[in-house]
Structures are given as C-alpha cells and as structure tokens.
Image (cartoon, helix red, strand yellow):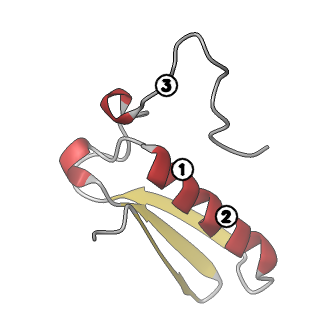
Amino acid sequence: MVESILSHVEQGVMTITLNRPERLNSFNDVMHQQLSECLKQAERDDAIRCLLITGAGRGFCAGQDLNDRNVDPNGPAPDLGMS
C-alpha cells in the first residue's frame, strides 16, 4: 500500500510530503488522519524545530477530494482536523 503522507526528520526539520500525485494530492480521510499523526509527532518531539509541507508531483494540493468522501449532506459535519 502506498502511503498518502510521507515524513522524515533531518537536522530538526520534519518534511511532510503529500503523496497522491495522481489526484494532485487532494485530501481524503486517510490523509487527514496521517497528517494529524505527523503533527502530533512533531509536537511531542522537542528536536523538531520546523515543519516543511510539500506535495509530490506537479501540484502541491488541489484541496479536498470530493470524490473520495462519503458524507451525509443532512448529517453532522465530520471532524477533519484539530485546532
């Protein structure tokens, strides 16, 4: 399985790569979860002093992948992030 989010840390910089170039790195639920985990890791690790977010392929991020969502338009809004 291909990871939707790639990350590595070098010299205090965590590089996070959105890795769905075939969809112009548009977000789906899996990417939201994986990005959240990367951000939590960065928050816990005092050695990480900087975050760099980039996209694989020719586009950074096309936004939310609306074709990948199964949301009830009459239901509650899903929690996609953290504040």
Residue 59 in the image: state x and y as whole percent. Answer: 28, 45
Residue 50 vertical position relative to residue 58 in the rendered view, above or below: below
Residue 13, by quadrant, is bottom right
- Looking at the picture, which amino acid does disc 1 mark? His
Residue wearing tag 1: 32
Distance between the alpha carbons at the discs numbered 2 and 3: 25 Å
Residue 18 horizontal side relative to residue 57, left or right:
right
Near-viewer residue (15 or 41): 41
- Looking at the picture, which amino acid does disc 2 mark? Leu
- Residue at the top extreme, as displayed: 74
Distance between the alpha carbons at the discs numbered 1 and 2: 11 Å
Residue wearing tag 2: 39
Task: Kindly identify the residue that appears in the image at 42 percent across and 43 percent down.
Answer: 28
| Total labels drawn | 3
Q: Secondary structure at mark 3?
A: loop
Residue wearing tag 3: 71
Tell me the number on the disc at residue 60: none
Q: Earlier in the sequence, mark 3 or mark 1?
A: 1
Q: Specify the quadrant that holds the C terminus.
A: top right
